[in-house]
Amino acid sequence: MTTVLAPPKNQAAARFATLLGSDKRYKILEAHIKKFQHRQDALIEVLHKAQELFGYLEDDVLRYTAWQLKLPASRVYGVATFYHFFTLKPQGEHNCVVCLGTACYVKGADKILAAVEARAVIKAGETTPDNKLSLLTARCIGACGIAPAVVYDGTVTPRQTPETTLAQINQWVAP
Amino acid sequence: MTLNDLQQIKESELAARKKIVLRCCLAAGCISSDSKGVKESLEKAVAAAGLQDQVEVRGVGCMKLCCEGPLVQADPANALYVKVTPANAPAIVAALSGGKSALAQADSNAPFFRLQESIVLANCGQVDPERIESYIAVDGYLALHEAIVEMEPKDVLDAIVKSGLRGRGGAGFPTGLKWGTVAKSPGAKKYVICNADEGDPGAFMDRSVLESDPHAILEGMVIAGYAVGADQGFIYVRAEYPLAISRLQNAIRQAKRVGLLGAGIFESPINFNIDIRIGAGAFVCGEETALMASVEGKRGTPRPRPPFPAERGLFECPTLINNVETFANVPPILRRGADWFAGIGTEKSKGTKVFALAGKIQNTGLIEVPMGTPLRTIVEAMGGGAPDGGKIKAVQTGGPSGGCIPAQHLDTPVDYESLTKLGSIMGSGGMIVMDETTRMVDVARFFMEFCMDESCGKCIPCRAGTVQMHHMLVKILAREATARDLAQLEELCDMVKHTSLCGLGQTSPNPVLSTLRFFRNEYEELLQPDPHAAPQLAGKA
């Protein structure tokens, strides 16, 4: 079982003091937590901010969040792993999100996904070994009017085909 | 803020109106086709032609015909330009001073537009979602004033009951009854939640409303808060909708600034605050008890009901949860009267319903039609049928909880009861059209995979059942299943349907059951003879 163990209390304070001193991102996260007055029900909001700052939720970030919100580490880990939006693994330099909503699916999004998987030699949810590309899928991004849609680095792109998608992917992935 | 202030804002906004308005769609679909670039180049072209005093370029929300985006509408000439690129801007501006332009236009008199009846979408594509003044200019927040200043909470409740409004999230629970229960529940602290966790794949109505007319949702929520006695609201919106989130945040800031939200609304003792909670990608959070757990910062798992949220909900307090579209219906009902609303639609389903039309169909986009409109009118007249001369095979409504309605039932009127009778549901309003190339068993498998992924794991029938049902569907598709497997699948569907804890599990077999009901032959074609069946006697020896 992979669980996040909280270090003993006095040690924790010292540890996080070092983190705060050495990494500016923790300072920003701390300010954000203060904005929510350390309220425990703000956990998901805090994790959103943490992921935005760090790119993914590493163990230290989860421990730090638990410590700041006075929550058991198990609870923070439980929430972070429950929601699809949070990732505990580092992401690639670029990301490609293939929408697999119904409208995109009936218009051939599965073929787009298969083409990218074959080209980058990874499965959906994985990152290439050289950390260039993360391939993700979405359960519907609400862009059904322009299906099939693919999101490249946060930019929604309409009416994609396997060819147009590969043209974009080829710019990112080594031949 | 008083009524006078409100009217002053409206008058100065109307006085500042220019003769000609170019409305440019800035909803998510069109933005992905560079409509921001279109708007910028329109502004430049207007300036280059020296028409700044006469022409306003306004960024608006969804103009409904998403497949033809980016869309630009010129008023009062009533020309709707489609698939506009930034390079077209000078030609559009040139056409304003008379003369025909060679640019592609959509016919605004086509059935797609003509057959719509807009209540919820009335302001979509008209007002600038980033400016509260633009909403006030179309009588926005007038209903809130009437409710707070001139009506007792009970009068507001009565109006909603009388209007016959039913929840637009899918199940169709009478809204007035829900509000009444929350109002009656004892407790000093109550909450109002707007469910904007539009998780059904293929549905984008709520997204469009949030992006195009965020103030209407805020107004509806404050009215609801006044009616039930709550002073805090939450909007639970998906993280996948960043534009909707930023427009809501902006709208809340503006409403607070002018005193339409926060403390002492319309200089009365009424307070109401709204906070946004951002979802994190869990479909089950659309279920109300799971949603409340998520707002509390916990894993989004549902709990048994009763107690219902109306009695004991968020933080153990009475809570009113309604869908985006339900709240959007509230201000027009108060402004135009419950009787007017009750006069639209059918006997049991009042008002209109917004649908997101997508899939294998000519015109994809948003439509709003009176309840009871036949499905055929929607997909054939308004949607223009399947593209490339294809034939429509089925229409899927209600997302993973719904079902497929076959072409022979296209004359069914769209209301809560008729769709339920066909084994589907109204759902939140996603409507996916499928043509002859779509294999129904594959569609059932697609939805089952969805439910399997999204099952929260709390109750066993759903957690284990969806995995087994998915496994059997894969087996059938691989042509490895026998009639016995199919019988077992049906048995399992029945079990999961009746024993799951929440709506996700209870409805997860629906796509299988509805495709089995109307397209059983497609399943049977894939079956293999059973090697273990008793040998058939080949006649008397």
Image (cartoon, rainbow, N blue to C red):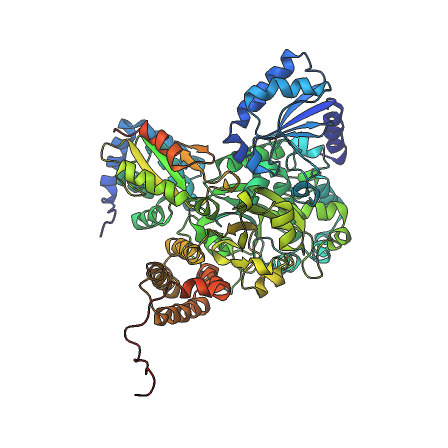
* Residue plotted at (32% across, 80% down): B536
In this orientation, does residue B291 appear? yes
- Give above or below for B283 relative to A36: below
Q: Is residue B198 left or right of residue B331?
A: left
Q: Quadrant of residue B528?
A: bottom left
Residue B57: where, in percent of width, then height? Answer: 64, 23
Residue placed most toward the observer, B351 or B227: B351
* Residue plotted at (67% across, 31% down): B134
Residue B489: where, in percent of width, then height? Answer: 39, 68
Residue placed most toward the observer, A92 or B472: B472
- Give above or below for B134 relative to B327: above
Q: Quadrant of residue A14?
A: top left
Number of marks in picture: 0
Q: Is residue B509 left or right of residue A54?
A: right
* Residue plotted at (52% across, 50% down): B432
Q: Is residue B304 left or right of residue B178?
A: left
Residue placed most toward the observer, B386 or A39: B386
Residue placed most toward the observer, B509 or B234: B509
- Give above or below for B189 relative to B241: below
Q: Quadrant of residue B205?
A: top right
In this orientation, does residue A38 appear? no
Q: Residue furthest front?
A: B541
Residue B293: where, in percent of width, then height? Answer: 45, 53
Q: Residue furthest bottom?
A: B541
Residue B59: where, in percent of width, then height? Answer: 61, 28
